[in-house]
Image (spheres, rainbow, N blue to C red):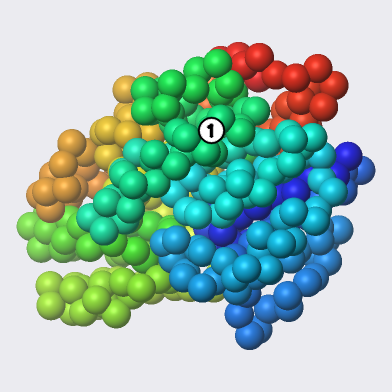
Amino acid sequence: MHVLQVTPRYPPHMGGMETVVQRVSELLVAKGVDVTVYSVDLERRLPRRQKVNGVLVKRFAPLFGDPLYFPEPKFIGGLRQEKAEIVHVHNAHTLPPFLAALSKRRDQRFLLQPYYHRFGQSSFRDSLLRLYKSGLRSIVLPRTDVVIANSMYEKETLCEDFSVSGKTALIPLGIDLEEVKRVRWVPEEPKRVLYVGALKPYKNVDKIIEGFAWLVRKKDAGFRLVIVGQGSEYNSLVGLARRLRIDQFVEWKRGLSRQQLLDEYAKASVFVLLSSLESFSLVVYEALTIGVPAVVLNFGALTNLVSAGLAEGVNSLNARGIADALLRSTKKTYVRISDEMNVFLDWQDYSRRIIDIYNRLLEQGFRGTQRI
């Protein structure tokens, strides 16, 4: 079996989607599957063609980068020449899935993993998405054999917006369960509030900083804020912390190794993520599995964690409300998340379910179920 994975970016560029594509691709190779990755992230420091842990990565230069990831013409020519039986495309908020659907041959099976969260990351991106949805309905989805949803929230929004219940499979994303379970949670003093993720506007890191500022000024000065990540908002966020006069309480970290990141989880008293544009959040589930209390928005893909008593929810991005939630999370006892709750899979099981879909597509077609 030859599988072509099509994604806007691939490691060393890192993020939730990039982690999924990398882990699945490498596990497929370990199971004897031939995997080629097409990405639109070619830059000077990266080779155009490279074998990484058995995965053949072909990188193409973007004519327009984030958010469109519109590739050079060689991208489409390459897609048409690939002999893959399975084409597995990622991120319906970008153009590569649209171009891959246009390039699909009749003898190929086509999977879409959209990471769909209904809205764009800014007003500009939201306007682009509204235009792009018509292309998804008329070109991408009719050519798609299976749509893979990462969470029940994503599945419901996909079915509401595109009427794809007959071809949608729900497969909760994987985490490295054994690795995470080995981490011993020993929160340090002063208490550490941890954020891990991109420094982009839709992640609402500015609101985290404002809530933290309220916490240390009005509630409890015995806290530190640790922000792990990089992105376009870094300078403005540093400036915000300085203007709020809390920069001495904030630690900025980037480029951490996996072990260094796990160490940050282990030391944290509370983990916080206030982005509503998530179909699933690996970092939140990793934190909860280790035992770190989490503060999340009480709507979107993570609201089920709040209703199940697994996390502390906030209903708005008000600074005082965020501060109160951070403080509550350090004093309450939450239900401990476990793999028996069926809200995530380990990577081995996740890759097994993906391969099962591939095989069913190649052997007998797919009729769609609520859960694979």
Residue 349 visible in image: no
Percent across and percent down for residue 76 are 66, 60
Query: Could you say which is closer to the camera, residue 312 or residue 45?
Result: 45
Judging by the rendered image, the residue that carries numbered circle 1 is 141
- Choose top left, top right, bottom left or bottom right for residue 244: bottom left
Residue drawn at point x = 37 percent, y = 23 percent: 160
286 on left or right of 116: right
Q: Is residue 238 visible?
A: yes
Residue toward you, 214 or 346: 346
301 versus 232 height, above or below: above
- Name the quarter where the C terminus is drawn: top right
**Residue 144 location, x and y as percent?**
61, 32
Above/below status of 352 relative to 94: above
The disc labelled 1 sits on which kind of residue? Leu
Question: Does 326 sit above or below residue 214?
Answer: above
Which residue sits at x=62%, y=68%? Answer: 73
- Residue located 63% across and 85% down the image: 44
Residue in the foreground of this view, choosing between 371 and 47: 47
Left-right relation of 164 to 161: right
Q: Is residue 99 above or below residue 164?
A: below
Which residue, as the protein is rendered here, is positioned at the far bottom?
A: 44
Helix, strand or loop under label 1: helix
Instruction: Please state if 105 lies on the left or on the right of 198 as rendered.
Output: right
Q: Nearer the viewer, residue 342 or 165?
A: 165
> If the image is split into quadrants, where does the N terminus sit?
top right
Q: Residue at x 56, y 48 (%)?
A: 97
**Measured from the top left, where is residue 274 in percent x and y?**
29, 48
The image quadrant of residue 307 is top left
Q: Position of residue 11 (x, y in %)?
A: 64, 64
